[in-house]
Amino acid sequence: MNLFELGFTEELASFIAGNNLSDFSAGRVTQEHRERYVVSDGDKEYDAEITGNMRFTAESRSDFPAVGDWVMISVSDSDQAINNNFSINRLERYLSICYSSGIEPVLVLSKIDLTSETEIRDAIGMPVQRLQT
């Protein structure tokens, strides 16, 4: 199956090109589960969620996608756990809570082989110790 078999049109392709959206992939919402979605690009289906500005500026349910809507998606590699949802600000908040409570924090990060120890050490300001499983 491809996007055109899902209903993609030349008009949509022109809209994407004219609005500088070529860094994203077009997809069609095929399922909705609360604030989670399944989006098809014609070849694959992706688990998706609303992020960024749209999530916080939506005033009602109608501001969110529904089944059948066309959306632009950014596909991330699900194997990159440390890079996918890593927030240095969130980590700093958790570390501040630990330190202010007199607790020595221990961080467990999976898939650290996907980035260098130097990057991790620079990001968290703590020594890195690899554990074998």
Image (spheres, rainbow, N blue to C red):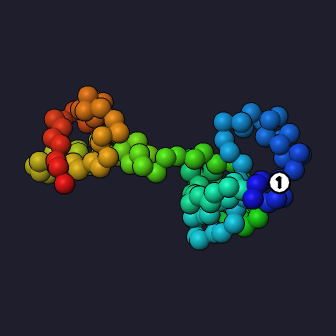
Q: Residue at x 26, y 28 (%)?
A: 118
Q: Residue at x 41, y 45 (%)?
A: 80
Image coordinates for residue 67, horizontal then vertical, percent: 72, 67
Image coordinates for residue 53, horizontal then vertical, percent: 60, 46
Q: How many marks?
A: 1
Q: Residue at x 23, y 50 (%)?
A: 108
Q: Is residue 33 above or below residue 112?
A: below
| Number of other residues with Cα within 10 Å of mark 1, as a class: few under 14, some 14 to 19, many 20 or more | few
Image coordinates for residue 92, horizontal then vertical, percent: 29, 41
Foreground residue among 107 and 4: 4
Q: Which residue is drawn at 27% across and 48% down?
A: 109
Image coordinates for residue 35, horizontal then vertical, percent: 57, 65
Instruction: State the residue lying farthest toward the front.
Output: 1
Foreground residue among 121 and 104: 121
Q: Is mark 1 on a helix, strand or loop?
A: helix
Tell me the quarter of the picture where residue 23 sits: top right
Is residue 85 visible in the rendered image? The answer is no
Tell me the quarter of the picture where residue 113 sits: top left
| Quarter the N terminus occupies | bottom right
| Quarter the C terminus occupies | bottom left
72 sits to left or right of 84: right
Tell me the quarter of the picture where residue 45 sits: bottom right
59 sits to left or right of 123: right
Q: In this view, does 36 lie above or below 123?
A: below
57 sits to left or right of 95: right
Circle 1 is placed at which residue position? 4
Q: In this view, does 25 lie above or below 123?
A: below
Question: Label 1 sits on what residue type?
Answer: Phe
Is residue 33 visible in the rendered image? The answer is yes
Instruction: State the residue lying farthest toward the right.
Output: 11
